Image (cartoon, coloured by chain):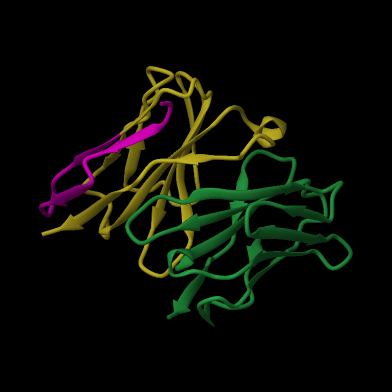
Amino acid sequence: GESVGLHLPTLSVQEGDNSIINCAYSNSASDYFIWYKQESGKGPQFIIDIRSNMDKRQGQRVTVLLNKTVKHLSLQIAATQPGDSAVYFCAENNAGNMLTFGGGTRLMVKP
Amino acid sequence: DGGITQSPKYLFRKEGQNVTLSCEQNLNHDAMYWYRQDPGQGLRLIYYSQIVNDFQKGDIAEGYSVSREKKESFPLTVTSAQKNPTAFYLCASSIGFGALLGNYGYTFGSGTRLTVV
């Protein structure tokens, strides 16, 4: 079936650097994408979303980029902080029924 | 504040015992979901409910059961038939289903960690 996948299971960055977390999706009919952050022992929290009629959306220190040509989604975190350490999931709504989640990328921030 | 509450936070189950995980939401969401998360892995769908008194099996429903008698509540029972129940269980809700997901997607609870002793 259709699935969402991630390129890197673990990403380690220096505090203050920018982080980029990538996600590949396979369903070209997907029209809505979300990034979630999950801290240890907690439920995922919404970070930012983007619809398929956009290619970029910015939030506070976060930017999501969508490249529909190659079916690629990325999350950019500016000036990464220790509090950003978590697992990040991408999810897609393929206009079917539910969100499909990627496997997750663990972001580790080194002080 | 509106939200979704899971209880208990930690739960211990003896071999052969059924246990029930609670999930309550006051967001007036129609759809609710249960996911299982194993260490270092993603989310796997157990059951979902689009509306009261209706629910559907997800990808790993064997050994689990649910009910949806009230809009606010979607309890999950882990039965003795589930041979490897130790995991982190997440409940989620959404305003609606399908196209209506395009409004912040899911809201998740804080999870229940179930351990077999």
Task: Give left or right: position of B100 versus A70.
Answer: left
Quadrant in the rendering for residue B15: bottom left
Q: Residue A98 or B4: which is nearer the viewer?
A: B4
Q: Position of residue A61 (x, y in %)?
A: 63, 59
Q: Is residue B1 above or below residue A62?
A: above
Is residue A93 among the parts visible in the rendering?
no
User: What stretch of residues is rendered in magenta?
Assistant: B1-22
Residue at point 44% right, 70% down? A82
Q: Position of residue B106 (x, y in %)?
A: 54, 40
Q: Position of residue B109 (x, y in %)?
A: 39, 41
Q: Is residue A15 above or below residue B107?
A: below
Task: Give left or right: position of A16 versus B2.
Answer: right
Q: Is residue A3 above or below residue A79?
A: above
Chain painted green: A
Q: Position of residue B94 (x, y in %)?
A: 55, 32
Tell me the quarter of the image containing the N terminus of chain B. top left
Tell me if residue B5 is in the magenta stretch: yes
Q: Residue A27 or B58: which is nearer the viewer?
A: A27
Task: Give left or right: position of A5 versus B39.
Answer: right
Tell me the quarter of the image containing the C terminus of chain B. bottom left
In this rendering, the count of numbered labels is: 0
Is residue B5 among the parts visible in the rendering?
yes
Residue at point 63% right, 67% down? A78
Chain painted yellow: B
Residue at point 37% right, 18% down? B69
Q: Residue B76 or B111: which is nearer the viewer?
A: B111
